[in-house]
Amino acid sequence: MGATIITTEDLQEFKKELLEDIRKLLKERQYTLSRKWIKSGEVRELLGIAPGTLQNLRLNGTLTYSKIGGLLYYDHRQIMELLEENAVNDASL
């Protein structure tokens, strides 16, 4: 197995890429946190759920929503509270 030599330039390039990725993530997070209402697709992505699961959460009253035209909007704060309320700290997992 051959050795790989990492140069100072390699480390500088890695640093630039890492900082750019962090900036991008922070910008996306700030954008989401600054908005009170988010659309269905964003909720599904945030929770990692299918459209049918989101529909069930609406139907059983777990998540409230507002409907304008054909678009559904959800309160970002309520979703975060729901996640906190259902957090599991199980050492056996």
Image: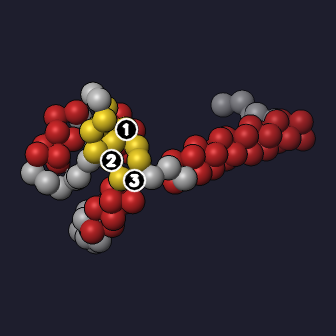
Q: CA distance from mark 2 to mark 3?
A: 6 Å
Residue sitting at the far left = 60
Give, as a three-letter code, the residue at label 1. Lys
In the image, taking residue 71 as reference, residue 63 lies left or right, namely left
Using the rendered image of the protein, determine whether residue 27 is visible from the camera's viewpoint: yes
Residue sitting at the far front = 69
Seen at 31% across and 35% down, the residue is 68
The figure's colour scheme reads secondary structure
Q: Which residue is mark 3?
A: 76
In the image, taking residue 55 as reference, residue 17 lies left or right, namely right
Q: CA distance from mark 2 to mark 1?
A: 6 Å
Seen at 28% across and 61% down, the residue is 82
Q: Quadrant of the C terminus?
A: bottom left
Is the C-beta separation of discs 2 and 3 under 8 Å? yes
Seen at 55% across and 53% down, the residue is 34
Is the C-beta separation of discs 2 and 1 under 8 Å? yes
Q: Name which quarter of the figure residue 73 lies in.
A: top left
x, y (%) of residue 63?
A: 22, 53
Q: Nearer the viewer, residue 85 or 91?
A: 85
Q: Which residue is mark 2?
A: 74
Q: Residues within 10 Å of mark 2 (few under 14, many from 20)?
A: many
Q: Which residue is mark 1?
A: 39
Give, as a three-letter code, the residue at label 2. Tyr
Closer to the chain start, of discs 3 and 1, is 1
Q: Quadrant of the N terminus?
A: top right
Seen at 72% across and 30% down, the residue is 2
- For label 1, the SS is strand
Closer to the chain start, of discs 2 and 1, is 1
- For label 2, the SS is strand
